[in-house]
Amino acid sequence: MVIISSIKNPKTISLLFRYFRNVRYSTNVSSFSTKSITPSVLLPNCCRNFPRYDPLVNYSLKNIVRSSSYCCNLRNCAKTHEIQASRTYKSTMPPTFLQKSPQEIVERCISENKVFIFSKSFCPFCFKVKAIFRSERIGFDALELDLIENGAEIQEALFAKSGQKTVPNVYINGEHVGGSDKVQELHSKGELITLLNPKTHSYDYDYIVIGGGSGGLASSKEAARLGAKVAVCDFVKPTPIGTTWGLGGTCVNVGCIPKKLMHQAAILGHDLKDSREFGWSTPEKPEHNWNTMVEGIQNHIGSLNWGYRVALRDKKIDYLNAFATFVDEHTIKTVDKKGKEKTLTSNNFLIAVGGRPRYPDIPGAKEFGITSDDIFSLPYSPGKTLLVGASYISLECAGFLHGLGYDVTVMVRSILLRGFDRQMSEKIGEIMEQMGVKFLRETIPTSVERIEEGQPGKLKVTAKTRSGGQVVDEYNTVVFAIGRDPFISELGLENIGVQLAKSGKIVVDKREVSSVSNVYAVGDVIDGGLELTPVAIQAGKLLARRLYGNGKELMDYVNVPTTVFTAIEYGCCGLSEEAAVEKFGEANIDVYHSNFWPLEFTVAHRPENDCYAKLVVLRKEGEEFVIGFHYLGPNAGEVTQGFSIALKLNATKSDFDNLVGIHPTCAEVFTTLTITKRSGKDVASQGC
Amino acid sequence: MVNKFTVEGFESFIEKAEALKSTGKPTYVLFSGSKDPATGKSWCPDCVVADPVINNVLDKLESEDVNFLYVSVGPRTFWKDQSNPFRTDLRTKLKSVPTLFKYGSSKRLEERQCSNPNLVEMLFED
Ligand SMILES: Cc1cc2nc3c(=O)[nH]c(=O)nc-3n(C[C@H](O)[C@H](O)[C@H](O)COP(=O)(O)OP(=O)(O)OC[C@H]3O[C@@H](n4cnc5c(N)ncnc54)[C@H](O)[C@@H]3O)c2cc1C
């Protein structure tokens, strides 16, 4: 096992072995003699982040040694993908670092690291101090003096410098803090964080966050926790028909939350139907009241809006319900509802303004159409509805509206769910069609006219098909869900020169910095990101930790699980079948799959072959690594969330096979997949 | 001007709150543990702390035309009964005292939040 050649400590070897457990190397590691080992540098806290074996990387001897030395030479620990991404490794502290004079080592450790702990690997006080920093999620670097040859000399040099003989010996921002007692004292008084971020500028704020949605709120709260002075500007421009909402952004007000709740309303409807087969005397056609549902959902949202305001106020974050525009790179102008203007300055800015639904450029679209921004608070029942677009938002809305009993048509230009696995997407379309949702394929609307006022009124929609035909029909409600655009046209980005990508979104590097060095961006507004709430939250938090908590960790955009809450739910993680084949070649990819019939469906006489599971595997090093997980069936979000950790940990197909199922569940199908697509065998479900 | 009212018990609360609501003015309600007639103090320590804080904010509010209703939820034994109407009724759904809320909205503060002047001020804003 090549890695070991550069690291000569039994502990490290065991660590490496743990992290590389997925690799079956031909050399037998246990035969490696540990007797002749002279202790070398070992940073246990740092090795925690030792890169895992990643099947997507071609490890050469060189880059394994590099990544290991990367980790063990006082360099900031980086996660695998960072090493992969750059592939070029530049060390500020080359392996020869520890051959320098003890004085120089001490000086450099202190000056080159914001938080530094001189430590001994066996010392319980050192452990305690590290635990404090970890619990505060403050990043630190450490040197274990007992694990290096010149540890004693370094400790001497440290004594000469700090007047402190023992370890731990902690430095923050180049200043000597002290040992374990001192750190604990500062911690209990809440002063540790003050040391971390001394005031270095005279702006009004350290951090102004523009956009109080998923990403912005998470980042502002984390930054405030770490002692930064923070303000959040959040303002909702009304939709063309005048809908507005409170603090919290898209997800809470007009996205995930009301969507999932309406989906739930539809599921209940379906379950009510099933319930008759299970002996309940439910009416054959239970009535649904749109307004009751909307009121319940909006009340819940109202309490969330208020909860966010309380949280901000509680954390001493200034909240401005005002629209922000950049004046220069340290200044914004804000305008509130009443037109009152304010000018605020800040050292750093976060742009987390998200996006808004796009309208097609056709007559009547904005006058008579609505979008997902309006549907969840619509004060009247929508009636016969046309959804325009093949996005997940369109299909999800179609799913719950149909489930609530409305006549629903979906008009799509080309394929369903672009970007998702093709087979799964088409299957969703087929199932929805079987359920009774109408699809108008290869069709785009050309005009919307109102032919009757009312709530809902009556609209005439004219559309054209690809083949040149014309389709005219009447609906009560038309919902456009053809995509979302970043909400930046009035942000004044031109005043500071923030670079935009072709997509119109903000270009950021992997640290989420825009082309202007003190302006950051996260969430739906960044180019190449993922438009998901937990992604915006995680990116926002990690960014705040890097800015104010000496954090090093970058947002990992790989293997993010997600679920589409269509009438039949679809959860996935990792690569689609197409993406896997394109990336690794058809010969190296296998697809294990199966239909399944959930137990709940049997008595209720629901279709036998709607539900489907597949794993996309990469054949490599004699193993089959699972690089794509796809599930179509009930509770897809719950199932996918759990399994996604397996993909994060680079699980193999045999790991899935070794897993014992929970019976009777849907998820257990993944422990028994044996048929590959290549085999051509039938996967239609046979029942239990 | 703040119009202050005091009631005791659930029935009188609902009656008064509905009457105040019909004035069209914003109505704020504070639910507290009832005061011991001997000491003049509520049995609930958080209520004792919250009282002056809330009164302070109300004093500063002088110019605004709002209703403020102080509700004694009853003695400790009554309150601790999980099936008392303050806890179960959909219009109150109280989880703790003190609770301060704007009647008919989702805006509410609970327990220690009621003694944070910052949060109390925010509740009375807009
Ligand atoms: C219908 C729908 C369903 C969805 N379902 C899911 C789901 O199930 N799961 C999931 O993970 N994600 C879902 N999403 C996506 C999710 O909502 C977004 O990814 C997430 O909200 C993005 O967060 P953000 O912080 O980037 O921005 P947002 O949450 O959009 O917040 C941005 C905020 O900034 C404000 N703002 C904009 N410009 C300014 C300015 N100049 N000054 C002041 N304020 C400004 C906006 O008004 C908004 O409040 C859904 C989205 C939609 C539309």
Image (cartoon, rainbow, N blue to C red):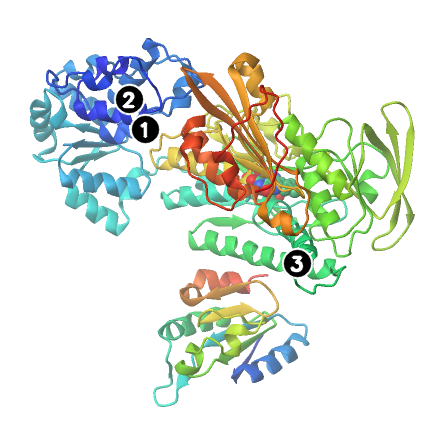
Q: CA distance from mark 1 to mark 3?
A: 50 Å
Task: Decide if residue A521 is on the left or right side of residue A177.
Answer: right
**Residue drawn 80% across the image and 30% down it:** A441
Q: Which residue is mark 3?
A: A275
> In the rendering, at what x and y percent does residue A106 appear?
16, 24
> In the rendering, at what x and y percent does residue A660 appear?
42, 39
Asked whether residue A348 appears in the rendered view, the answer is no
Identify the amino acid type marked 2.
Cys
Sequence-first tag of 3 and 2: 2
Whether residues under marks 2 and 1 lie with C-beta atoms below 8 angstroms apart, the answer is yes
Q: Which residue is mark 2?
A: A71
Task: Decide if residue A209 is on the left or right side of residue B65.
Answer: left
Let me know if marks 2 and 1 both belong to one chain. yes
Given the image, what chain letter belongs to the residue carrying mark 2? A
- Looking at the image, how many numbered discs can be counted on the residues? 3
Asked whether residue A643 appears in the rendered view, the answer is yes
Identify the amino acid type marked 3.
Ser
Whether residues under marks 1 and 3 lie with C-beta atoms below 8 angstroms apart, the answer is no
Q: Quadrant of residue A181?
A: top left
Sequence-first tag of 1 and 3: 1
The N terminus of chain A appears in which quarter of the rendering? top left
Please identify, in this view, whether the residue under mark 3 or under mark 2 is nearer the observer: 3
